[in-house]
Image (cartoon, rainbow, N blue to C red):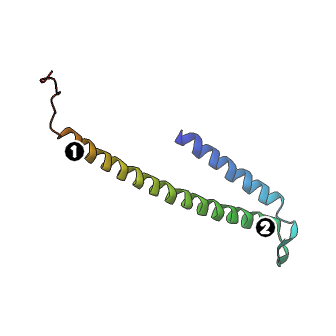
Amino acid sequence: MIIVNLILICLFIVLGIIFGIQNGAQRVDMNFLYWGVKDIPFVLALIEALAVGMIVAIVIATINEIKNKNFIRRLKREIKDMSEELAALRNLPLEEDEKGGE
């Protein structure tokens, strides 16, 4: 599976390089809210968009990781509490029936 992932990554890198070479001469204007950049290479605009997307994905993944760690910590605490309760229940003395021990 690792080899397949490496092959796919290399394929995307090669396709990105080919795309960049073929569109390297094109220039674009980029605007976002109040900011704007004029006359930058199209490939640079794509790289910036990729970088912003990666940053957003990393932030979202970090938030999810923190939530998952907190959830795991809570579950471990519950397991510990339940194990202590189970041990206490196992150590309780057995009580005999009122009819004479049967």
Residue pictured at 22% horizontal, 44% vertical: 88
* 23 left or right, relative to 14: right
Residue pictured at 32% horizontal, 45% vertical: 82
Task: Give the quarter of the figure containing the N terminus.
Answer: top right
Which residue is labeled 2 in the image?
45
* 66 left or right, relative to 50: left
Numbered disc in front, either 1 or 2: 1
Q: Quadrant of residue 44?
A: bottom right
* 1 left or right, relative to 26: left
1 or 2: tag closer to the N-terminus = 2
Residue 24, compared with residue 13, is above or below; it is below
Q: Which mark is residue 88?
A: 1
Q: Nearer the viewer, residue 27 or 57?
A: 57
Residue 4, how many percent across, how many down? 58, 40
Q: Amino acid at mark 2?
A: Ala
Label 2 neighbour load within 10 Å: few <14, some 14-19, many 20+: some
Q: Nearer the viewer, residue 45 or 73?
A: 73
| Count of residue discs | 2
Residue 21, how many percent across, how many down? 79, 59
Q: Quadrant of residue 24?
A: bottom right
Label 1 neighbour load within 10 Å: few <14, some 14-19, many 20+: few
Q: Which mark is residue 49?
A: none
Residue pictured at 68% horizontal, 53% vertical: 13
Residue pictured at 54% horizontal, 61% vertical: 62
Q: Nearer the viewer, residue 75 or 45?
A: 75
Residue 102, how many percent across, how many down? 15, 21
Q: Amino acid at mark 1?
A: Ala
- Residue placed farthest to the front in the image? 99
User: In the structure shown, which secondary structural element does the residue marked by tag 2 occupy?
Assistant: helix
Query: Circles 1 and 2: CB distance less than 8 Å?
Result: no
Residue 74, how many percent across, how many down? 41, 54
User: In the structure shown, which secondary structural element does the residue marked by tag 1 occupy?
Assistant: helix
